[in-house]
Amino acid sequence: MCCSDNFTEADLQKRDANPVYLDSVKGMQFFDPHVHMTSRTTDDYQAMADAGVVALIEPAFWLGQPRTGIATFRDYYASLIGWERFRSSQFGIKHYCTIGLNSREANNEALAEQVMEILPLFIYKEGVVGVGEIGFDDQTPAEEKYYRAQLDLAKEAGLPVQIHTPHRDKKRGTQRSMDIALEQGLDPKMVIVDHNNEETVNEVLDRGFWAAFTIYPFTKMGNERMVEVVKQYGPDRIMINSAADWGISDPLAVPKTAALMKQHGISDEVIRLVTYQNAITAFGQSGQIDEADFASVKDIDQSQKFEGNTVLRGGQQPRMDKNSLIIK
């Protein structure tokens, strides 16, 4: 049978669009408030849509290697509010973004100064729900300088701030990030402190900030640990994201964590808050999020174009059948 010339699609057994472990959260809606879709494929968009992701936020970040000129930043920011937003819409997912100078590239001060000059051209654009992701990497003086400058920019614009907490010396970096935000006069309710873990969450919540958790293999949080955090702290001001990017990461981290929480007896309402509603409440302070834009399923026309381009290549038909083994 495997080598027959008569092997057709009719001979194949169809599989479910979603893995069995997601059956328990079928019908639920998810909002991933931190995912770098520029580095993901259209297959990821389709898988996320199939799993119930209806909206996401893409923070500006570094691309794996340093950018060398201001034009590369300008084009990147333009893509976040242009092509990437369009590409997301072609799979029924509402795309928002945060715009900022990431901490890694803040250490090139000559270039960072130029980036600071163009940020006001982008942060007031439609669909920009915050300044981010900003903060510390190596906790250098330059990183602090441009972190403070961007906090001032966010305060002036009335936008939430999305803070990247460092991989190294996380507890001190998180404390320092919050201290500086308060020194610059920001209200903690306008600040989302991201990439938390068990070591940081208590202080973040106690000080009135939003606590975001990233489910990212090996380097940040696993979802079994996340279940225990939600059990201990409840849903107030906690949100879950994938931060899926060009590294080994999982764009389905949010629905998978929801399914695991359900298996462990966490209520649907608590799951809804930490995987959907809290992100809307926090970033909705920007005035840019209207839940009606993604609360109901809308017709998708993948033949639509953005500046003459579509997600369809070379005469492709819209939305391939992912249930089939045959690729035509």
Image (cartoon, grey):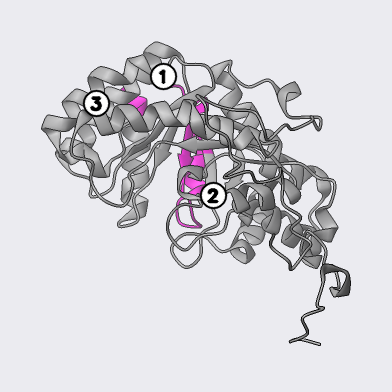
- In this view, the residue in front, 217 or 115, is 115
Q: Name the residue under label 2.
A: 213
- Tell me the number on the disc at residue 245: none
- Tell me the number on the disc at residue 123: 1
Residue most extreme to the top? 156
Q: Is residue 66 left or right of residue 236?
A: left
> Is the C terminus in the top left, top right, bottom left or bottom right quadrant?
bottom right
Dot placed on the residue nearer the N-terminal end, 3 or 2: 3
Which residue is drawn at the image coordinates 23% and 50% (left, top)?
A: 138
Which residue is drawn at the image coordinates 78% and 29% (left, top)?
A: 295
- Tell me the element at label 2: strand
| Residue 108 image position (x, y, % from top left) | 15, 38
Q: How far apart, in angstroms, are the residues tagged by discs 3 and 2?
A: 28 Å
Q: How far apart, in angstroms, are the residues tagged by discs 1 and 3?
A: 12 Å
Dot placed on the residue nearer the N-terminal end, 1 or 2: 1
The region drawn magenta spans 181-210
Quarter of the image where one finds residue 321: bottom right
User: Mark 1, residues whose alpha carbon is within 10 Å: few (<14), some, or many (≥20)?
Assistant: many
| Residue 234 image position (x, y, % from top left) | 68, 47
